[in-house]
Image (cartoon, helix red, strand yellow):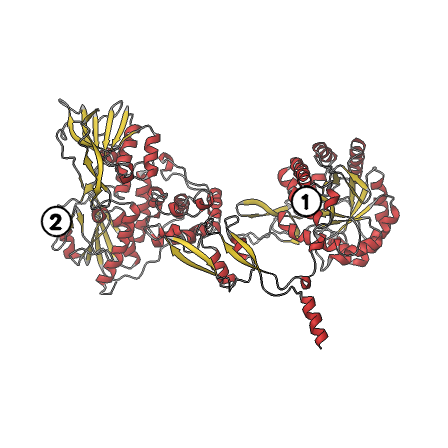
């Protein structure tokens, strides 16, 4: 068993798996049960001014016969009293001193309100504060959540207010609903944040009822846009984490967004996250997924001969960069393993209509026979992505016969000529 | 469109397999990879665009799925149940090539058709009235498919059948584990919304029908059971498989007692397997299927044979009956061991008696003949120009037209007894042939 402990913004955690601020961290009973089952840390359901939640609140997107490829919600912050939440947080911290407990806070843009809330939260004995600048639904209309996190100046200023009011590490939770998250990340760093958590949910409408014309989730005869989460948002989250990791903000990152398995978590670590936070997968399967998250991650670290999670942090970043740094001379072509091919022919219309006419089809012995026309193949990957048979269509590297060159070099050469 | 729960009350209770629930159908449809030039469709004798109707289930377009099915095969509800899909469409599914179960096309088709039949009359556009009137003899799959297609093309159609119930063999002679008579009859009644007239319990003369109709379709089916032509064949206890099957289907008493009896079924086709299954079901002590060639030459589908064996029947290959013996009733069969010789006209290896092996006897109480059937020559025999060869009516394979240009034919009386889907396809083909002939068009 590999050592899974991590240190994030000065906070020690038994493992890198934290529960994100959401329904799974609504109550003390839940959080304590989660810690008993092995979760490393938890960010409490956001504390704010009293609100009322609606019924219903969630909507799902299924895909390929499986439930919840994505989910969106229109739930707001906690609808329990602040006193009750603080009291339960105190109890949890007393019983689980080794497990990081983080208070998530959201307030209107008044300095004193933020300061008061920060003081009361830190009195519970919690390990850090996370200010929620990310909620995309319900709260922005009240000047909170993403309304702040979409403006670098507000982010900087309010982060500074809270930083001044607390001795605890301060995390800022960022929204993906911005044109470039790097600006917000740098603003949070300038305001004094000690760590960044991202992404919050993606503004979304999951669907519309074709009979009633009411979008989902339905509240009486209306709906409202919500925040999208679950496996569908992982690619968005991975990009944003990598973007922040290379933004110059220089802060540790808690990665969030569509993490359901240890493999997902490893990808976040490789792109620069130190810990990960999980919500939707727990809402789908329960706290019990923590066993395989730890078990799988531990096995992976052992297999790779790595001492611990920090050894993974940012290891994919040297392989990621601007498009203009890609080698224009590199070439792959599709290669079909005829022994594995089942003759479904689906690659043919895909390449003809959505690719480059690089696959031919014929019928032999009543079976579809597909062939790659290498001269036409641009190496786009499409056929290998849609082929239903694993390892049947693979992309084979071929020598282009040209020296390596990037677009940046091409441009530089043009400039020298002029 | 929303998915209603699958309807009950279509008599599916006795059928071996329950219908799919909507969520099962959608999940099964989602597994289909929507092949290009899909092999499953090439395996369908009716030419159903299988991938297309399955995709429509997946997209929630059941109306469209039903349209695709009915355009190619109006008897899609029956065929969904009785087609040997593992030999036809599903048997060509590419998924097993990657280690995954083939799509259950029959069950998906059944799901769509049950939904469609719940929605009310079939949604089929009918062409405007041509003023022509066609008679269809036989309300079996070929006749009904022909009648519906003729209605679509705008002709007036009168269907005649000597039986009291429509559906032909599907109603009267297919083993209940595949389809119940209620389902088969209900399907015909549903299709009758297209406006063909159904005259049941009427013995008609095709020769007379030709005088007052623009064309006549013969969907007569087969009438005469083939005999073994051995001694003892007329002893009490020797019965035809069809008589057992039709008795059970119609609720009439069995032609012979089966409870606790030892039964020998002679034949290697799907009627033989049906009969063997029914005998077991009716309490027979021991059922033995006897076939004169080897398993490779058996016309019965492998899946049916497997079911028969799973239910405890024995299979005796390469044995031919020499005689049936008994004092006042069947006491046993004398069998001649056979070997395989050269291929015969059907391409299968011919059974030849083994000189080195003496005949053996197999004691039994009942002998069931399941050797196939021939067309009842009394009916078509009086039509001028109509030719019958080896017990089958001869037709032009493109149009279904017989030697008499006013008469068309299809189904078992033409193909000698194939699947329901073949009969349906031939009925539909003949309807188009008649349409072209009546209106003087080229086919």
Residue A371 on image: x %, y %: 46, 58
> Is residue B303 toward the left or the right of residue A321 in the image?
left
Question: Residue A15: percent from the left, percent from the top?
Answer: 73, 38
A380 or A54: which is nearer to us? A380
Which residue is the site of mark 2?
B381
Q: Is residue B284 visible?
A: no
**Chain on which label 2 sits:** B
In this rendered view, identify the residue nearer to me: A296 or A398.
A398
Q: Are marks 2 and 1 on the same chain?
A: no
Decide: is A396 above or below B180: below
Asked whether the viewer can see residue A368, the reply is yes
Q: Is residue B387 left or right of residue A332?
A: left
Give the chain letter at badge 1.
A
Q: Give the left or right position of residue A240, taking residue B227 as reference.
A: right
Left or right: residue B368 compared with residue A240: left
Of labels 2 and 1, the one closer to you: 1
Q: Tell me whether circle 2 and circle 1 mark residues in contact (CB < 8 Å).
A: no
Residue at the extreme bottom:
A418
For this rendering, which residue is in front, B280 or A8? A8
Q: Which residue is mark 1?
A: A265
């Amino acid at each position: 068993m590999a050592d899974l402990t991590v240190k994030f913004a000065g906070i020690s955690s038994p493992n890198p798996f934290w529960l994100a601020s959401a329904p799974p961290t609504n109550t003390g009973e839940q959080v304590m049960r989660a810690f008993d089952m092995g979760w490393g840390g938890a960010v409490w359901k956001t504390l704010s001014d009293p609100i009322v939640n609606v019924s219903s609140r969630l909507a799902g997107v299924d895909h390929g016969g499986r439930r919840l490829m994505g989910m969106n919600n229109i739930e707001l912050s906690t609808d329990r009293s602040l006193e009750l939440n603080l009291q339960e947080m105190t109890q949890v911290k007393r019983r689980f001193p080794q497990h990081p407990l983080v208070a998530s806070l959201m307030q209107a843009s008044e300095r004193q309100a933020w300061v008061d809330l920060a003081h009361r939260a830190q009195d519970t004995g919690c390990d850090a504060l996370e200010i929620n600048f990310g909620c995309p639904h319900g709260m922005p209309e009240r000047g909170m959540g993403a309304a702040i996190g979409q403006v670098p100046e507000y982010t900087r200023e309010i982060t500074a207010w809270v930083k001044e009011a607390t001795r605890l590490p301060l995390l800022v939770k960022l929204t993906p609903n911005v044109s470039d998250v790097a600006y917000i990340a740098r603003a949070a760093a300038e305001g004094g944040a000690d760590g960044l958590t991202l992404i919050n949910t993606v503004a979304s409408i999951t669907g519309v009822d074709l009979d009633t014309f009411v979008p989902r989730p339905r509240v009486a005869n209306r709906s409202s846009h919500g925040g999208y989460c679950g496996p569908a948002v992982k690619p968005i989250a991975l990009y944003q984490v990598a973007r922040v990791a290379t933004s110059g903000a220089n802060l540790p990152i808690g990665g969030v967004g569509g993490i359901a398995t240890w493999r997902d978590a490893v990808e976040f670590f490789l792109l620069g996250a130190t810990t990960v936070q999980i919500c939707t997968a727990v809402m789908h399967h329960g706290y019990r997924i923590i066993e395989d998250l730890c078990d799988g991650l531990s096995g992976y670290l052992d297999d790779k001969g790595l001492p611990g999670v920090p050894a993974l942090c940012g290891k994919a970043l040297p392989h990621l960069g601007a498009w203009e740094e890609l080698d224009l001379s590199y070439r792959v072509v599709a290669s079909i393993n005829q022994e594995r091919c089942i003759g479904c022919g689906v690659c043919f219309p895909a390449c003809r209509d959505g690719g480059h006419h690089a696959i031919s089809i014929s019928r032999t012995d009543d079976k579809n026979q597909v062939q790659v026309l290498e001269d036409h193949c641009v190496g786009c990957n499409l056929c290998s992505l849609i082929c239903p048979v694993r390892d049947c269509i693979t992309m084979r590297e071929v020598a282009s016969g040209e020296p390596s060159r990037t677009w940046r070099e091409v441009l530089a050469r043009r400039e020298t000529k002029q | 469109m929303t998915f209603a729960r699958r309807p009950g009350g279509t008599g599916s209770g006795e059928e071996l397999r329950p219908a799919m629930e909507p969520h099962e159908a959608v999940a099964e449809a989602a597994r289909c990879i929507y092949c290009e030039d899909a092999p499953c469709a090439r395996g369908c004798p009716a030419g159903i665009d299988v991938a297309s109707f399955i995709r429509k289930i997946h997209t929630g377009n059941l109306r469209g799925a039903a349209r695709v099915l009915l355009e190619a095969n109006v008897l899609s509800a029956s065929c969904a149940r009785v087609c040997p899909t593992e030999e036809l469409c599903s048997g060509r599914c590419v998924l097993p090539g990657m280690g995954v179960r083939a799509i259950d096309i029959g069950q998906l088709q059944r799901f769509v058709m049950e939904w469609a039949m719940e929605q009310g009359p079939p949604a089929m556009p009918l062409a405007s009235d041509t003023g022509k009137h066609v008679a269809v003899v036989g309300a079996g799959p070929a006749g009904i498919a022909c009648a519906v297609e003729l209605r679509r093309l705008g002709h007036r159609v009168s269907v005649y059948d000597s039986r009291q119930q429509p559906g032909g063999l599907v109603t009267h002679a297919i083993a209940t584990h595949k389809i119940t008579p209620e389902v088969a009859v209900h399907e015909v009644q549903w299709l009758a919304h297209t406006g063909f007239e159904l005259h049941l319990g009427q013995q008609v003369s095709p020769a007379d029908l030709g005088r007052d109709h623009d064309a006549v379709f013969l969907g007569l089916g087969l009438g005469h059971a083939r005999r073994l032509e051995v001694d003892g064949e007329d002893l009490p206890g020797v019965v035809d498989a069809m008589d057992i099957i039709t008795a059970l289907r119609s609720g009439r008493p069995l032609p012979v007692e089966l409870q606790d009896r030892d039964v020998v079924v002679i034949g290697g086709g799907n009627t033989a397997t049906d009969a063997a299954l029914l005998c077991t079901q009716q309490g027979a002590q021991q059922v033995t299927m006897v076939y004169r060639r080897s398993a490779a030459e058996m016309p019965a589908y492998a899946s049916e044979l497997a079911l028969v064996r799973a239910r405890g029947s024995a299979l005796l290959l390469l044995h031919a009956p020499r005689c049936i013996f008994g004092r006042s009733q069947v006491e046993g069969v004398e069998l001649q061991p056979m070997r395989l010789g050269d291929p015969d006209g059907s391409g299968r290896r011919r059974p030849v008696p083994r000189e080195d092996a003496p005949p053996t006897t197999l004691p039994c109480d009942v002998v069931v003949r399941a050797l196939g059937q021939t067309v009842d020559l009394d009916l078509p025999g009086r039509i001028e120009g109509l030719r019958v060869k080896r017990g089958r009516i001869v037709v032009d394979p493109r149009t279904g037209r017989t030697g008499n240009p006013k008469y068309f034919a299809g189904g078992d009386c033409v193909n000698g007894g194939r699947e329901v889907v073949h009969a349906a396809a031939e009925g539909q083909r003949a309807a188009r042939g008649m349409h072209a002939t009546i209106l003087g068009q080229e086919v």
